[in-house]
Image (tube, rainbow, N blue to C red):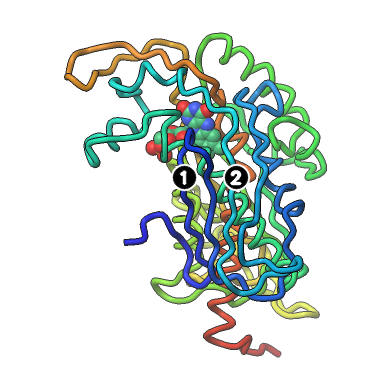
Amino acid sequence: MSLNSFGHLFRVTTWGESHGPALGATVDGCPPGVEIREEDLQVWLDKRRPGQNKHTTQRREPDAVEILSGVFEGRSTGTPIQLMIRNTDQRSKDYGDIAETFRPGHADIAYHLKYGLRDYRGGGRSSARETAARVAAGGVARAALKAALPGLKITGYMVQMGEKKIDRAKIDMEEIARNDFWCPDAQAAGEWADYLDALRKDHNSVGAMIEVVASGVPAGLGAPVYGKLDTDLAAAMMSINAVKGVEIGEGMAAAALTGRDNADEIFMGENGPEYGSNHAGGILGGISSGQDVVVRFAVKPTSSILSPRKSIKLDGSATEVITKGRHDPCVGIRAVPVAEAMMACVLLDHYLLDRGQTGGHRGRIG
Ligand SMILES: Cc1cc2nc3c(=O)[nH]c(=O)nc-3n(C[C@H](O)[C@H](O)[C@H](O)COP(=O)(O)O)c2cc1C
């Protein structure tokens, strides 16, 4: 069983726990000759790194990535790439209270019921520190994509925090890097800051919605029917901690549309087909159409809050849990770079699968 791995040809296995000495990813299937340097991967890890502003966990981890294998003189050799990130700011004493108590909303009870034992420190394997390994692997995927598909661009951002949504008329992609929330609407970001401050001071937390768009994706990635690009994207996003819903393109809102409204009309452009809209989120029949690939997902509110919640102990007795430690009041913020990484891994995987099956052969129009 390979339950800690994902991907078909570009296969990523993550390993490690929150409070162990290190965690990381083994990346198998990266094509040879791709330029990969630690400092290039670090750029993506720095985006996910905790403690960067007051709206994320104050755990201070440098998240410095080390390449242990598979890269020689700055280029991938085609052999497994081992990536390691040392844990340096564990405070296991923060978690002593939960050794025998199940935190509501956390994986504690499910891990215990399944395995009968668990590394409770910081959530162990269920901790979102695992996502640092995904981001490192995503950096490798991005490097390979840059070489294979130079026009491809992946952009993630938050579109909703709690009940507060962005105003899509005010989207300015330049804004994403200018605020603490990866938010493309400057006004919304300002409102979210006060909103989240108030929730944190009230010992509460909130959920969020993240959108990831890949532009420059060539038509033809993905396959019928169990190899659908949208199936793998949904699975990849759903595998991120705290994700409770994933949609592609119009997603759940498609249920409220009529066929006339939902049809993405097709026109012949100078360089091939063009579409009047993108309700499909760039994927038809599981195969990319050449339009932007659009994925959206909801994360639940952070379970670790300083408000008492009812639970039980290992011996079955009732208790109340107040989760101390350092936590993200809205996990959506730091989920953005993770989602971009998952998008990169899935797109590279499907690029390699398509190259393997069709050798780049394409149908012609006109
Ligand atoms: C980037 C990221 C950071 C997270 N940080 C926290 C956190 O500080 N506190 C917390 O309770 N949950 C946090 N989570 C969510 C938990 O890891 C997650 O809810 C828990 O492992 C249970 O898994 P599930 O929600 O997928 O069922 C985070 C999730 C992500 C993606």
In the foreground, 139 or 360: 139
Left or right: residue 60 versus residue 110 is right
**Assess mark 2: CB under 8 A from ligand 1?**
no
Quadrant of the rendering where the C terminus is positioned: bottom right
The residue under the point 57% across, 53% down is: 295
Check if mark 2's residue and mark 1's residue have beta carbons within 8 Å.
Answer: yes
Mark carried by residue 85: 2
Identify residue type, mark 2. Answer: Ile
Identify residue type, mark 1. Answer: Gly
**Assess mark 1: CB under 8 A from ligand 1?**
no
Q: Residues within 10 Å of mark 2 (few under 14, many from 20)?
A: many
Q: Is residue 362 above or below residue 65?
A: below
The residue under the point 28% across, 31% down is: 109
Q: Is residue 213 above or below residue 366?
A: above
Quadrant of the image occupied by residue 209: top right
Q: Is residue 207 visible?
A: no
Left or right: residue 208 versus residue 238 is right
